[in-house]
Structure formats: structure tokens, C-alpha cells
Image: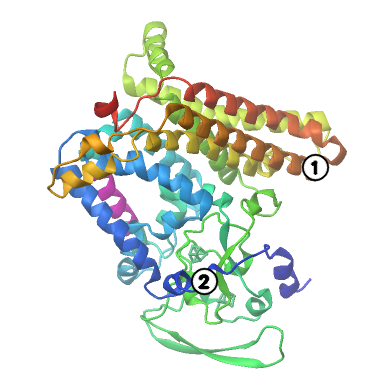
Amino acid sequence: MNDNALLERHQPAIGLDVLRLPFIGRLLRGRYGRLLLQAPFALLALALAVDGFTGPQSAARNLATVAPWVHLRGIVVLVLLLAGNLICMGCPFTLPRTLAKRLSKSGRRFPQRLRNKWLAIFSLFALFFAYEYLDLWASPWLTAWLIIAYFAAAFALEAVFAESAFCKYVCPLGSFNMVYSTLSPTGIAVKSPAVCASCVGRECVNGSYAPQPLIRIDEIPSSGTDETQKLEVAHGPSGALGCGTELFAPQMRGNMDCTMCLDCVRACPHDNVSLFTRAAGAELSRADSWPRRWDMSLLVIVLAFMGLSNAFGMVPPYYALQEALALNLGITSEWLALLLVFGLGNLLLPLVAALAAAWLGRRLTRFRKRDSLRDTVAAFAPAFVPVGFGIWFAHYSFHLLVGPGLIVPVAQEFFGGAGDWARWSFSLDANLIGSIQLLVLLGGFLWSLWLAQKTALRLYRRKALLGMLPWALVFALMMLAAWQIFTMPMEMRGTLELFG
Ligand code: SF4
Ligand code: SF4
């Protein structure tokens, strides 16, 4: 099979070209399109840092705590579900990327041993541990330092390494967004694989930015015709950057690792790549979407379990467990108890659950010899995305809906006015919030079941039911555990002083 046929075969189904929409498409495609989104986020990050360092050190009255820990997280999950990874697209931490690239003379690659998702799993674990142990949600000052640390880490890695190592391998927020943007109804794809097959420069990934200007002529046939089109591609400092996370547009199978920066769109001299609508979660039911690697599979599985433990840290049984650990095992140190609970709940439990489900599925179907344990886990890992997303959505929407208007008086006070607390300190009806939580938990669970069933059919054919049973059990237990947690009184972090 030639290159062209291969690319055609793997081309994901695409819908509407979002970048052809009248106003918004033109805006996003433009050279400074992303900047339009990043600029307000950068101003917001600046305001959070300023308020965090100089404002009132009360969680419910400071922008640094209310905006990210109450509002933004709720908005992030909604945007991922309805639109796509607009959060990474507007991420202000990569704003100094071009400057960093100019400083980066070496063009050094990120170490081969770290070019995987292990670091991302570690940074997610570290962030959730720090969030809980340091009570980040309650400390504007520490949250402001976290923002500074983020800018510094992103800049340093961009400056030292050729690729966007921070986004692809390190950033915990980016990892969260990338994993759950696989559910999104939009994604990057090429218009014509045939054009890519004969493209010489492959600027979508290489970029046309280079310290030394150079002119190259690409000769490519226009799609569907025999004509040869001559294009001048100006390489130089005014050129466009290629894909920072090193995705090659015609080979992309989904949104994993895509920050939706649209650099590929701007760099492609053939106008052959764009942002398209697609069936939500399309890549999750395809066998060839993700590489079959332990790190990739475990990132997705671990993240779903982290949703459970993150919520568990806010309900009374967690404190009872802490007391029991102190009483029975003599573990009185808070950090050690937390490390133990998170180590078990965030790392060991997902690993054991995935291995046990894969082992049992292979045994029940007698397919042990054909697929390795690693390949079986990799095949079912995408099915953890919806159930995990449901848990995160239920959790984050709770905090958002408990105090949706709080950001207004906090902002009023930040700008020197009087906060109208009486008017904006309202909460949505508890039954309504509970119904939303139940709906997203059930929706995520059923979606995961459907994906597991499709995977089992593909792997085990007539024995599909037996093969999917262990996975269905894991999803059901996760959903029930989440529901149990959400029906308990949960700490209203960030809004505690007002409602607690
Ligand atoms: S630069 Fe454009 S035409 Fe060339 S490979 Fe990339 S998307 Fe295809
Ligand atoms: S350049 Fe890479 S990360 Fe950016 S939108 Fe294109 S594929 Fe995604």
C-alpha cells in the first residue's frame, strides 16, 4: 500500500471546517489568532498573581483562589465537552514560546527516556498531592506562587528543548485537557491526504520558522487534478512555528497531545489542515488511535481514579480514615497519611484494577495467548475516559454551582470597589446540583460501557460479553463509589467562609 492510500485509510471522518466559519474562523486562523485568546488569560493570570500576593488572604475573597479553584475548573470541563481544548489554545503559559524559541540555540531534544507520559502521571500526582496537603484552594499566596512556577517551568523547557516538552510531557493541566479533549466534538485533521503525501516541506510539523532565512519551492499536485502547483514557502524568523508537540497532521488520529494552538494550520503552505467538527469521542472507539504503551494507558486510567480520590479527600470518611491510620498504624504525620491514601488510590488501585480486569477478560475468553496483558489494557484504556470525565465533571460542577456568582464581588473588591456579596452569594438548588451530578455520572458510565463493548466485540467476537464483564464491573464500581462520595456532605472549598 502506498503512502497516499495509507493516509486515506486512516483519515478520521471530518465534519464542518470550523476555520471557514465567517468571523471566528478568520480570527483564529490569523497569525495573531491565538494571541486573542491568550491575552485575556494572561491578564487574568496576572490579576490572580497580584491579588494572591497583595490581596486579602481569605480563600473566598481572593481572585487567586476563587477563580481557578471554584470557577475555572467547572468551566474547563464544560468547554472540553462542548467545544474542544480551547483551554490549551488560550493557555497563557506558552505565550513566551516564540521568545523562548529565539533563545533556544541548541535545538536539543527532550531526553528520549522522558518522551512518554510517566512524567505527566508524576506531575498530576504531585499537583493533587500538593493541592490537598498544602490546602492550595485556601491559600491565595501559594496559588499565586503556583502560577509563577508554571510560567517559569513552561518558559525554561521551551527555551532549552526544541519541542514543546512542557505541554506534551510535563504539564498536569495540559495532560488533563488532552485526555478529556478526546471526548470533544472538534479536532485537527487534514483536508486531503493526497496533498500531504506529496508535500515536501511538511511545515505543519517542521514549521517555516528558522534562524536562517531560506526559500524553498515545493512542487505538489493540486488535489484531484494533474496540475502542478508551485508554492513559495518563505522560511525565516517571520515564518510559522511547526507543531510543538510534534504531531504530524496527516497521521493524527485524535486529540491526544494536541494543544489546539493551530500552528499547523498557519504553517501549512497548502492550506490543507484545519479544525473540524467530528463525532464526540470518535477516536475512543478506534483501535489505532493511541499507541499501545503502558504509560499512555495508565495516564488515562490513573486520571479517572484521581477523580475519585480528589473528591474523597473532601468528605468525612477521609478524615475518619486519617484518624484510623493514626490510631491503628501510628501514622500521625498528615503528609504520610495522604501519601499513603493517594499512593494506594491514585496509583496502586488503578494499576491493580486494570491488570485484574485484563487478566480476567483474557482468561474468561481464552484469548490469553493472542493478546498480551499490555495490549489488552491499551485496548480498553480509552473506555476509562468517559467514566473518569463524568466523575471530574460531577465534582467540579458542584463547586461551580454552589457559588456561581461569587466571582463578581471578588472582582469588584479586586478593582477597589465594594463587593455586592448579598446579591451574588447565591447557590443553585441542591437537588438540581445532585441531579446534574447523577446525570453526568450515569452518562459517563454508559458511554464507557458502550466503548468497552465495542472493544470486546473487536477483540473477542462471540465471547465479547465475557471479555467486557470485568471492565464493566470496574466502571460500575467507580461510578457507584463516586455517587456515594457525592451524596455525602462535601467541603465547600473556596466558598467555605461564606457558606460553611
Ligand atoms: S504541511 Fe500541510 S500539506 Fe504538508 S504534510 Fe503538513 S498538512 Fe499536509
Ligand atoms: S500544531 Fe500540533 S498541537 Fe497545535 S493544533 Fe496543530 S496538531 Fe495540535
Residue 438 on image: x %, y %? 55, 30
Q: Quadrant of the C terminus?
A: top left
Taking depth in this image into account, of 437 and 68 the one nearest to the observer is 437
The answer to which quarter of the image holds residue 89 is bottom left
Q: Residue 62: which disc?
A: none
Magenta segment, which residues?
143-155
Question: How many other residues sit within 10 Å of disc 2, few (<14), some (14-19) or many (≥20)?
Answer: few
Residue ID at (45%, 57%): 86
Taking depth in this image into account, of 388 and 410 the one nearest to the observer is 410
Residue ID at (75%, 34%): 468
Task: From the viewer's perspective, tell me whether residue 287 is left or right of residue 31.
Answer: right
Mark 1 residue type: Leu
Residue 212 on image: x %, y %? 38, 83
The residue that label 2 is drawn on is 21
Question: How many other residues sit within 10 Å of disc 1, few (<14), some (14-19) or many (≥20)?
Answer: some
In the image as oriented, which residue stretches furthest toward the right?
462
Task: From the viewer's perspective, tell me whether residue 182 is left or right of residue 6.
Answer: left
Mark 2 residue type: Leu
Query: Does residue 146 belong to the magenta stretch?
Result: yes
Task: From the viewer's perspective, tell me whether residue 134 is left or right of residue 371.
Answer: left
Residue 238 on image: x %, y %? 37, 81
Q: Residue 457: which disc?
A: 1
Residue ID at (63%, 73%): 191
Residue 124 on image: x %, y %? 43, 40
